[in-house]
Amino acid sequence: MGLFNYTPAEKLNGQTAARPGKRFGNSYFRGFSIVSFLLGWQLLVSFRLLELPSPFETAIVFLDLVVHGDPLYNKTLPEIVWSSLRIVVQACLISILIAVPLGVLMGAVEWFRHYVDAMLEMLRPIPPLAWIPLAYVIFANAGRPTEYVQIFVVFVGAFFPILLDTIHGISMVNRIHVEAARTMGASRKQVLTQIMLPGSLPSIFNGIRVGFGVGWMCIVAAEFVGGKLGIGYYIWSSYSVGGRVAEIISGVIAIGLVGTVMNRFILFLEKRLVPWR
Amino acid sequence: MALILRGVTHQFGDAKVLENLDLQVEEGCFCCVVGPSGCGKSTLLRIIAGLYQPIGGEVLLDDAPPSLEKGEIGFVFQEDALFPWYTVEQNIKFGLKARNFDKEMWDDIIQYNLEKVGLAEYKRYYPRQLSGGMKQRVAIARVLAYNPKLLLMDEPFASLDSINRNMLQADLIDLWSREKKTIIFVTHNIDEAVFLAERVVIMGHKPGRIKRIVDIDLPRPRNRTDSNFCRTRRSILEIIES
C-alpha cells in the first residue's frame, strides 16, 4: 500500500545533547566540594576547635574496621551494617506487599478509600519510633522480640510513603488510557492490573525509594533503644564506652554510604522495570 | 439502521452540555460532527460509547443500548491513547484479550491490521519510539483488530501537522471504502469534515444541540481546491457562524 510509505520516527533513546564544557565544570565543582569539606574538618581539628580525630586518622580506623573488624564486637563493619540492612529489606518488602495493593484499591475504589483513609489519618501522624515501647509489649512473648520490634518500626516508617505515592500514582493515571481500555471491553480487573498498576508504577517506585530511606533512618534509631546488633547499636555503644570517636564517625559514614547505595540501586531497578519512561 | 439517538440530554453539575439531541446514523455511513469547542462533541461521543450515562434520552445501537462489555465500539482518541508500557503488538493484543478472541488468532489479526495501516514492521516498538502520525495509525489498527460495529473518532488527527493529517485522512477514506464501517468522526476542522464525510452534523453550543445536518455528495476522491469543495465548506461555515 503505497499510501502508507512512512519514515520511521527518530529513536528517542540516543538523544542526549552533548555539552562537554558544562559537564567538566560540574564534576570539577563536585570534587571541589568534597575537598573543601575535608579541609574544613581538618582545620577544626588542627585548631582544636573540636575534639575529633582528623579525616586521615578516621580513614585509617574506617578501613581497619572494614577489613579486620572491631575486636570489642568481634565483627567487621560490613557484617554490622548487614545485620541492620537485613531488617530494613525484610520490613520494606512487607511494606511494599501490603501498601501497594492497598494503595491501588484505595485509588480505584472510592468507598474503600474513605473507609481506610479515616483509619490511616489517625495513625499517620504518629512517628514510627513512638511505636517502639508498645511494640515491645506486643512482641514480648514472640521468639525474637527485638528483631520483630525493629521490623515493625521500619515497616511503619516505610509504609506511608509507599502507600501515599501509590494512591497518588493511581490518581494520576491518564484518564484516556482508562477510557480506551473500557471501550475495548476490558473488565474492571483488567483495567486495574493492566492499566492502573503500570500507569502508576513510576510513582510507586518513588514511594519505595522514599520508604527505604525512612526505613533506614528508623532502624538506626530503633537499634539505639534495644538489641545487640546492627549499626545503630554499634555507634551508640561506641559512644557509651567512651573515647571511640573515630569508630562512631566510621559508623556514621557507613550509614551514609549504605543509604546512598540503596537509593541508587532502587533508581537502577526503576530504569529496568519501567523502560517505557 | 445502525445508531439512533433520541432526546439525548446531559449536564455536568449545573451546566447543560447537550439538550434534546436526536440523530440517526445508517449503517456504513461516514458521519462528521463539527461545531465550536465546548459544544459537547466529545461528550456526545462518550455517551454513544457508553462511557457516560446521559441524564435524559436514549441511545440505541442496533436496537439495544451500547454496552462497553460487548466491544461493539472502537474509540480513537485525540490524545495519545496507546498504553506506553506495551509495545505496538501488545497494545493490539490488549483489545483482543479483553474481547476474548481465540489466542491462536492473535498473531494473524495483529499482522493483518498492522499491514492495513502500513506499520507491520513496527510490531515490537514502544509508542514513544513512534511519531504522532504513526501512533494514531496504531490506535486505529488497535480498534479495527476486534472488529467493532461502530467507529467513534474524537479529533484523532488534531495534533498532527497538516501534511500528515491529509495523508491520514486519505488513508482513512481508503479504509472506510473497503470495510464500510459506520464512522462518527468529531472535528472542529471544516476542511477535514468536508473531505471525509457523507454527512456533516453541525452543532451549536450553549447548550449543545444539532443546528443542521448537511449531506455531502461530492465525488471521491475529493479535491480540496475544487470549487464545489470550497462552496460546500463556505456554506457549512456560514451555518456554524449563524
Image: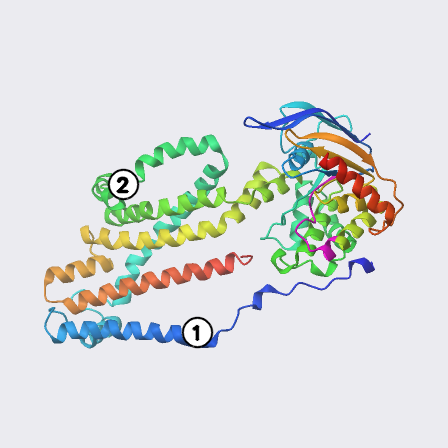
Q: Which residue is mark 2?
A: A126
Q: Position of residue B201 (x, y in %)?
A: 76, 35
Mark 1, mark 2: which one is toward the viewer? 1
In-front residue for pair A90/B191: B191
| Span of residues in magenta | B150-165
Instruction: Tell me how far mark 1 sits from mark 2, CA to CA.
Output: 45 Å
Q: Earlier in the sequence, mark 1 or mark 2?
A: 1
Residue at image location 44% in from the left, 34% down from the top: A113
Amino acid type at mark 1: Lys
Q: Residues within 10 Å of mark 2 (few under 14, many from 20)?
A: few
Compared with residue A21, is residue A108 higher up or lower down, i.e. above or below?
above
Magenta includes B164? yes
The residue identified by callout 1 is A22
* Mark 1 Cα shell of 10 Å, populated few (<14), some (14-19), many (≥20): few
Q: Is residue B228 left or right of residue A26?
A: right
Q: Residue at x 41, y 62 (%)?
A: A265
The amino acid type, in three-letter code, at marker 2 is Ile
Which chain is mark 1 on?
A: A
Q: Position of residue B58 (x, y in %)?
A: 70, 24
SS for callout 1? helix
Q: Chain of mark 2?
A: A
Q: Which of the labelled discs sits on residue B17, or is there none?
A: none
Q: How far across and how far down the image is residue A232, in percent?
A: 22, 57
Q: Position of A20 compared to B78: left or right?
A: left
Q: What sort of colour scheme is used for the picture? A: rainbow
Q: Viewed as shown, does residue B1 lie left or right of B188?
A: right
